[in-house]
């Protein structure tokens, strides 16, 4: 396992990011940037720096500095504005209008730093009839038409953890939006506001299935949702499972050979009318073998057959070990940064660590990137505390329900 590198290395080493509130997709998207060298400062509520883990460490904040500020207090609000103005990117995850009421909305930041990229990460977006409502991953993937596709035939939809909405449709799209907006800002010399909504991101992930050739039928009857016996999960003799993805004829033939099945005695993969007969034959052959026995056979064959591993087993798998897919930082084994760059690989620099807003701002003020963009930035002073009127709404409920 690789050792963490020094801060300030990686493809995004000169990028400064302020993360305002929010959980899940915002944390993950900003973590991707931190993994590749960005200096990410996450502003948290005092007393709640690690909301997701009882042991006090949230891995989504790895590589970040944590600054505790109560944005309902004028002094803390002013400190947040000064820090945000000094950043290249500001990300917030509250419902529409909350950032403005807290004095850290895009107008306040871009007025002082026109090059700022201001990203708004929500579940429903900044507009539309659902924009003011709360929600979670399960709600967004349901509304986007994705949840209906997950599950077995004749069974209810099954949420795929919160990977699709929060992390793929949210965090990944957030990181892409940031980098795209920064690229445009470098060309034009002016930043912009990015409306990043999980429901939009999930809909976009479903693009391929809007084509007539891949349009989805009822759940559990399609090529890639266990509708086809050659793309299925089967139980082994020791009650473990294997994943089979032998759709192509060359893989299917090797699958049958590995299971000792005679192609003349089982239906072919294109025989739609006899799919359930084929499923039963594959299930019976696999159920007669333990997971270890199947691994011994298929580790030597190219048949698209893979054991279903636990998280712990995935860490210890020879392929993971060979690729150093997991790193040990601070005694916690965790996934290594992705993707992999040939000259400037990403590194997990450290677990999250506390800091103050002023020390972060002063450090950024002396950076090379700050010198390049100084002509477009008016740093907010302590006298610029924004009016706190109208903050009767608590920040904490807004943050919890923003997604």
Image (cartoon, grey):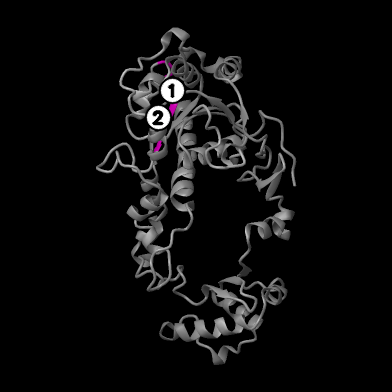
Q: Position of residue 111 (x, y in %)?
A: 38, 17
The answer to whether any part of residue 375 appears in the image is yes
Residue found 47% across the figure and 9% down from its top:
382
Q: Quickly name the residue at label 1.
A: 71
Left or right? Give the position of 188 relative to 124. right
Q: Position of residue 38 (x, y in %)?
A: 59, 31
Quarter containing the C terminus: top left
Q: Are marks 2 and 1 in contact (CB under 8 Å)?
A: yes
Residue found 58% across the figure and 18% down from its top:
364
Residue 2 versus residue 371: which sits nearer the camera? Answer: 2
Label 2 to label 1: alpha-carbon separation: 8 Å
Q: Quickly name the residue at label 2.
A: 395
- What segment carries the magenta color? 112-121
Which quadrant of the view contains residue 73? top left
* Label 2 crowd (10 A; few <14 / some 14-19 / many >=20): some
* Label 1 crowd (10 A; few <14 / some 14-19 / many >=20): many
Please tell me whether residue 62 is drawn above or below residue 308 in the rendered image: above
Q: Position of residue 189 (x, y in %)?
A: 44, 22
116 part of magenta stretch? yes
Residue lying farthest bottom? 265
Residue 323 bears which disc, if any? Answer: none
Quick one: SS at disc 2? helix
The mark that comes first in sequence, 2 or 1, is 1
Residue found 55% across the figure and 32% down from its top:
49
Q: Position of residue 265 (x, y in %)?
A: 55, 92
7 part of magenta stretch? no
The answer to whether any part of residue 203 appears in the image is no
Q: How many marks?
A: 2
Residue 179 versus residue 132: which sits nearer the camera? Answer: 132
């Amino acid at each position: 396992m690789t050792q963490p590198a020094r801060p300030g290395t990686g493809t995004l080493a000169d990028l400064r990011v302020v993360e305002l509130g929010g959980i899940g997709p915002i944390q993950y998207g900003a973590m991707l940037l931190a993994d590749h060298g960005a200096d990410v400062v996450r502003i948290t509520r005092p007393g709640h720096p690690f909301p997701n883990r009882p042991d006090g460490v949230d891995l989504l904040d790895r590589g970040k500095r944590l600054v505790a500020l109560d944005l309902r207090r004028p002094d803390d609000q002013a400190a947040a504005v000064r820090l945000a103005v000094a950043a290249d990117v500001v990300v917030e995850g509250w419902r529409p209008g909350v950032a403005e009421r807290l004095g850290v909305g895009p107008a306040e930041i871009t007025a002082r730093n026109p090059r700022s990229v201001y990203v708004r990460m929500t579940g429903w977006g900044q507009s539309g009839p659902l924009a003011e409502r709360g929600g979670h991953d399960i709600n967004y993937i349901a509304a986007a038409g994705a949840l209906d596709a997950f599950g077995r035939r004749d069974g209810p939809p099954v949420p795929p953890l919160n990977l699709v909405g929060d992390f793929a449709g949210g965090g990944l799209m957030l990181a892409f939006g940031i980098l795209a907006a920064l690229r445009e800002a470098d060309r034009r010399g002016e930043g912009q506001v990015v409306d990043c909504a999980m429901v939009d991101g999930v809909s976009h992930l479903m693009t391929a299935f809007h084509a007539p050739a891949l349009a989805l039928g009822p759940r559990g009857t399609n090529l890639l949702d266990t509708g086809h016996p050659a793309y299925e999960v089967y139980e082994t003799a020791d009650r473990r499972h294997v994943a089979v993805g032998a759709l192509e004829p060359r893989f299917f033939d090797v699958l049958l050979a590995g299971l000792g099945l005679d192609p003349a005695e089982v239906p072919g993969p294109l025989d739609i009318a006899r799919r359930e007969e084929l499923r039963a034959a594959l299930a019976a052959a696999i159920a007669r073998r333990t997971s270890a026995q199947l691994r011994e056979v298929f580790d030597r064959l190219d048949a698209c057959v893979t054991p279903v591993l636990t998280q712990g087993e995935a860490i210890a798998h020879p392929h993971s070990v060979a690729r150093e897919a997991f790193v040990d930082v601070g005694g916690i084994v965790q996934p290594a940064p992705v993707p992999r760059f040939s000259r400037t690989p990403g590194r997990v620099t450290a677990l999250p660590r506390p800091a103050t807003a002023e020390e972060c701002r002063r450090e950024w003020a002396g950076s090379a990137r700050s010198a390049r963009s100084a002509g477009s930035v008016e740093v907010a002073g302590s006298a610029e505390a924004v009016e706190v009127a109208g903050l009767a709404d608590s920040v904490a409920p807004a943050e919890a329900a923003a997604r």
